[in-house]
Amino acid sequence: MTLADATLDEVDQVVAQADGCFSTFRKLSGFNRAAFLLQIKKELQKDQAEIIGIAEQETALGKKRLSMEFERTLGAIENFSRLCTKEPWLKPKPTPKTDGTKGGIKMLPLGPVAVIGACNFPLAISVVGTDTMSALMVGCPVVVKSHPGHPQTCEKLADAVRRAIKISKMPVGCFHLFHGKRNEVTQYLVKHPLLSAIAFTGSLGGGFALHRTNQERKNPVPFYAEMGSLNPVFALPYLIGSNSKKFAQDFVQAVNLFAGQMCTKPGALFILKSSLTKDFSHALRTAIEKQITLPMLNSEIHANYENSCLHLEKEIQLFCSSVNQPSGNYGKVNIFTMDGSKFLGSRNLRAEAFGPSSILVLVEDENQLLRIAESLDGSLTASLHGTEEDHQLSEKILPILESKVGRLLYNGFPPGVVPGNATHHGGPWPATTDSRFTSIGRHGYQRFLRPLFRHS
Amino acid sequence: MTLADATLDEVDQVVAQADGCFSTFRKLSGFNRAAFLLQIKKELQKDQAEIIGIAEQETALGKKRLSMEFERTLGAIENFSRLCTKEPWLKPKPTPKTDGTKGGIKMLPLGPVAVIGACNFPLAISVVGTDTMSALMVGCPVVVKSHPGHPQTCEKLADAVRRAIKISKMPVGCFHLFHGKRNEVTQYLVKHPLLSAIAFTGSLGGGFALHRTNQERKNPVPFYAEMGSLNPVFALPYLIGSNSKKFAQDFVQAVNLFAGQMCTKPGALFILKSSLTKDFSHALRTAIEKQITLPMLNSEIHANYENSCLHLEKEIQLFCSSVNQPSGNYGKVNIFTMDGSKFLGSRNLRAEAFGPSSILVLVEDENQLLRIAESLDGSLTASLHGTEEDHQLSEKILPILESKVGRLLYNGFPPGVVPGNATHHGGPWPATTDSRFTSIGRHGYQRFLRPLFRHS
């Protein structure tokens, strides 16, 4: 088995195979496809130790986190399998009698789906994640491009799917994995005329480039990219006054969760200047210094993180860092600081730095705080922290934040949820390309369906 | 009141006003906005005679059709008003307990919406159609660009909305109409950074051009274009053998409905060569010759129709036409004919000719019929006509047609429905830019919402 890039001919072949089996695959009963999903789960379980072992070698996430992620991935597959036996999307919605017609609307699968997964969840947002599983569930064949950060893990996961295809007697074309480190291969896939939808999770840069590639398609298709996000945190004065130590600890912990390699890492904390008292300043420094500096996914990601921090240091002040590690791809927690007017004036400093850094923005007054909120681009999440005494300001800022994000946390930090059935993981541009849908959770499958009104 | 094109500054102003009132408008209670919609209905009713009179002058649709369309438009407004008192989209969907979090998903309005209506429904797909009303219902301010084919009608409709805004004390910015005959004005609107969604109904050419314009946006937003569509009709051998006269009459009537100026006009009829017996040929000619040649919307549309027919005549044979009218913008029914292999080889002949023309395609055999079905682009509708004896072929062709359209009629002709609450009016590219949604019917409002997961 080679991990060389697929040739463009090979990409053609696998997409053609996916398209070729679509009409058969979508006509299988829900029970059939549900059994297929369960079989994938079983095959994954057989390889559990080996899969986690390979992922440990390819990423620095560690056994504990990878085991959790593995369980979460299996749980999602089981949920989709259960849903698939019911196929609620196939149930025709009755047409009101006033229309004078019989028949109704039912949901149809779109067709072959391309999946391009993320670096930070090699199991859960990868070959057998929500994208693949929900697409297979509704009857869409899937073509996965492996992630160059963990290609062997991808192969091992795909292996389980391939065995399940044989055992469950599914059409071979319903699932393919290929490798493509070169952008050219990915772009060729995204432009492939036989595709019906594309699901991508990754950086803003990568997502934006593929968004542009997708726009060159002759037959436009839904393009779902889940990309970078600032995930702003707003802490109002009374909250900080009353609870500065715990707030500081929780904030820094959210920044450093899995070395800041979460889609929902808080990239900026906004407080009023007057809130940076000696107490809070001390609490924040202590929390930062106490953080254990964690290894990042791989050397490339670590180097990118260091570069983005160097870039920030040229523009704004470093507030405090965690203790360095002597060697390896360890990412120090770096909290930078700037004032509100600088933030308002410099959009280039707002991009997500993938890793455990964040920016403490010291805001002049309430008015500036509201203007900052208004100026924000879309994010996956925003968090608002306040006490009852902050109510008035809170009421002003909440509707603004609502209009900027897909998930709003009150007195909580992202991620703030165990990813589950009801998760909504999406948000306005540029957090995602399509804020109407979610890439995680049960409703992810709705990305791959469209209504058909069938008269009978 | 002038009907001159808006300047780009004026477009800026109205979109800024729409954006400026969004946070107020969306926070109004459903009862408030429902009352506003009902008030629009009342104001329209006051002007009913005048509106229909102006529309009669600007289009050739005639009083009877325009009166029907007016009633349909009022009915849709009333439906949306009723729905708005319930605001079902605001109801939080509970988060399963297993997630360990409180809160839930609710739907939020996207923001200011641009509406660009169609020529063929000056009342129902225009200033106060589903696009505008469903957007206002969920709390999105609306900016409408008038249609150059009926600008005075648009003004008169907008007048009613403006009065309703005053009476219902809505923010002035929640609705604006401006004129823009020049493409430049429309393009400027579509690229406006403060817009959150765009709804367009019109030709494939126009929709495709705006689709490209939309792609140049820096912040991509949902772009809903409902465009041209071939709406293929497949008639299987036994059906034609048993019922050729009625079938021929109904088909030609569907082609000539409102002078072929329907989004769902059947643009091609596919039959097996062997089905073109003397009987069916005679029945079809009789049906065509019996059709009354109807006036088209205006001279420009009539000229375009004549040109597209001239183009077709150079490429393929004319089968039969209805009787000419001595003068005016009358559009003859023109049924052309070609054989299946020619159809398979010439994609340029498949475009919608807006007007009462269609193409009778004589197909070699069943195999070629299936290949033709596979080769079709997306359409709003497809129709399959067969008897029980056609069952076997019918079963082969149905799944193919399902994958090509948004609405499938069995032994019926488009439109086939009275537009109502449950209508699905959409279909795969290039019939629309987003087959997941509908531009007509109750569910049209879902185009202007996105989910927000709010933790509490």
Image (cartoon, coloured by chain):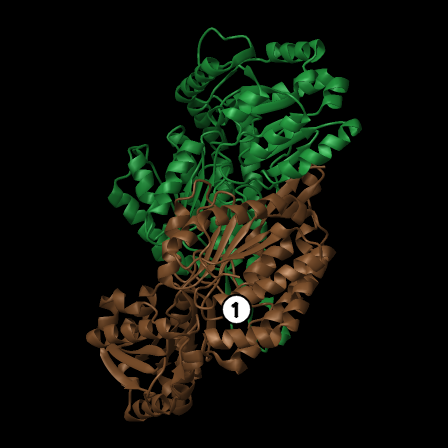
Chain colours: A brown, B green
Q: In which quarter of the image is residue B93?
A: bottom right
Identify residue type, mark 1: Thr
Left or right relative to A295: residue B272: right
- Image location (x, y in percent) of residue A200: 46, 59
Nearer to me, A265 or A298: A298
Left or right relative to B42: residue A298: left
Q: Quadrant of residue A441?
A: bottom right
- Image location (x, y in percent) of residue B382: 61, 32
Residue B196 in sight: no
Find disc 1 in the rendering and name its residue: A153
In the displayed structure, B4 sits above or below B361; it is below
- The subunit letter for the residue under badge 1 reads A
Nearer to me, A69 or B384: A69
Q: Which residue lies furthest to the right in this view?
A: B389
Structural crowding at the residue carrying mark 1, measured as other residues with C-alpha within 10 Å and reported as few (<14), some (14–19) or many (≥20): many
- Image location (x, y in percent) of residue B432: 50, 40
Left or right relative to A41: residue B142: left
In the displayed structure, A139 sits above or below B233; it is below
Residue A420 in sight: yes
In the displayed structure, A248 sits above or below A228; it is below
Left or right relative to A371: residue B442: right
Q: Residue furthest front?
A: A1
Which residue corresponds to the image point at 36% horizontal and 74% vertical from the top-left?
A299
Nearer to me, B61 or A74: A74
Which residue corresponds to the image point at 73% horizontal and 52% vertical from the top-left?
A29
